[in-house]
Image (cartoon, helix red, strand yellow):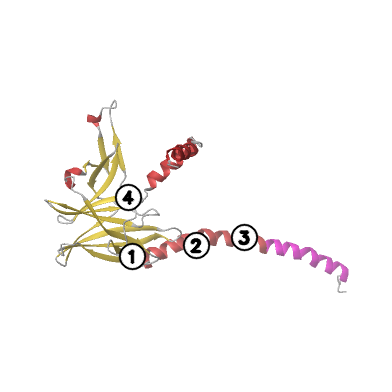
């Protein structure tokens, strides 16, 4: 004899199985979503590292002899971080290519200043996250850091180089400054206190670099990230400081 399952029992079994199947499908879907969520940034980084176009822009100095080519390539698809470098050009001949410090988001615009010295022209590049001094004659790139109100420079060997300084017993004569492990010296040793002349600024688009000369747009001072952070720390430590400052300014304002 062939046994048959009553219709009511079969329907009950199907009703019991359906929620289980839905739960399994939901769990599998969530797990796949998590895998995709973690895998997508990794894959995007790999793709951007190999296929992201390198943007380039060339700027010729007023002497018509020296020029630099600034280039960058994106290294993080999620945020605007770039690996940057500069190539020195003399009389149309390409020379050394040296790294600039990494743009860790916020490295544009870059203000460009010309410094004429007896040793040859220098370029001072100033942006929100870093500073560089370019010796275009000797094709040498220096990183710039500021310690106790003075600017120090050291040859930049590593795009990720950081600055450190130390002093013993608050004695200024024992001050030691290094950038990327390289002993730094006063920036004035190279600039000879010569004045800076604003040439223009580099700006960056989604996949391009641009240079706007001073003749087309006036200088806009760069607000350094370190100074911005210091303001925020001061505001957090003394919430009333900005109110007191406004009151003082209002008292000094002529009526």
**Viewer-closest of 240 and 99:** 240
Q: Going by the image, does 51 lie left or right of 145?
A: right
**Viewer-closest of 222 and 176:** 222
Look at the numbered disc 4 and give the secondary structure of its residue. loop
Nearest to N terminus: mark 4 or mark 3: 3
Nearest to N terminus: mark 4 or mark 2: 2
Label 4 and label 3: CA atoms lie apart by 43 Å
Nearest to N terminus: mark 3 or mark 2: 3
Q: Indicate whether 3 appears above or below 247.
A: below
Look at the numbered disc 2 and give the secondary structure of its residue. helix
Q: Which residue is mark 3?
A: 30
Q: Which residue is mark 4?
A: 130
On the image, the x and y values in percent for residue 56 come to 29, 66
Label 4 and label 2: CA atoms lie apart by 31 Å
Look at the numbered disc 3 and give the secondary structure of its residue. helix
List the single residue furthest toward the left.
118
Q: Going by the image, does 248 lie left or right of 15?
A: left
Label 2 and label 1: CA atoms lie apart by 27 Å
Which stretch did the figure color magenta?
A: 6-24
Q: Which residue is mark 1?
A: 209
On the image, the x and y values in percent for residue 105 come to 40, 54
- The reply to whether the C-beta atoms of the residues labelled 3 and 2 are less than 8 Å apart is no
| Residue sitting at x 58%, y 61% | 33
Nearest to N terminus: mark 2 or mark 1: 2
């Amino acid at each position: 004899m062939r046994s048959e399952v009553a219709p009511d029992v079969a329907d009950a079994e199907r009703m019991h199985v359906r929620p289980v199947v839905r739960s399994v499908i939901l769990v599998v879907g969530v797990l796949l979503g998590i895998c995709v969520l973690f895998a997508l940034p990794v894959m995007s980084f790999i793709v951007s590292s190999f296929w992201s176009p390198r943007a380039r822009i060339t700027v010729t100095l007023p002497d018509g002899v020296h020029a630099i080519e600034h280039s960058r390539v994106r290294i993080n698809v999620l945020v605007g971080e770039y690996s940057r470098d500069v190539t020195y050009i003399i009389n149309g001949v390409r020379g050394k290519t040296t790294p600039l410090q990494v743009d860790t988001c916020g490295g544009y615009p870059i203000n460009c200043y010309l410094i004429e010295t007896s040793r040859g022209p220098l370029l001072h590049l100033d942006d929100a996250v870093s500073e560089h001094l370019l010796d275009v004659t000797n094709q040498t790139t220096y990183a710039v850091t500021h310690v106790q109100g003075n600017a120090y420079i050291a040859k930049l060997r590593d795009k990720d180089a950081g600055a450190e300084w130390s002093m013993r017993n608050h004695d200024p004569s024992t001050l030691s400054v290094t950038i990327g492990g390289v002993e730094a010296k006063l920036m004035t040793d190279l600039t000879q206190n010569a004045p800076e002349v604003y040439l223009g600024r580099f700006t960056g688009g989604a996949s391009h670099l641009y240079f706007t000369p001073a003749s087309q747009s006036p200088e806009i001072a760069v607000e350094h990230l370190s100074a911005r952070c210091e303001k925020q720390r001061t505001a957090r430590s003394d919430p009333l400081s900005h109110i007191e400052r406004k009151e003082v300014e209002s008292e000094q304002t002529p009526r």
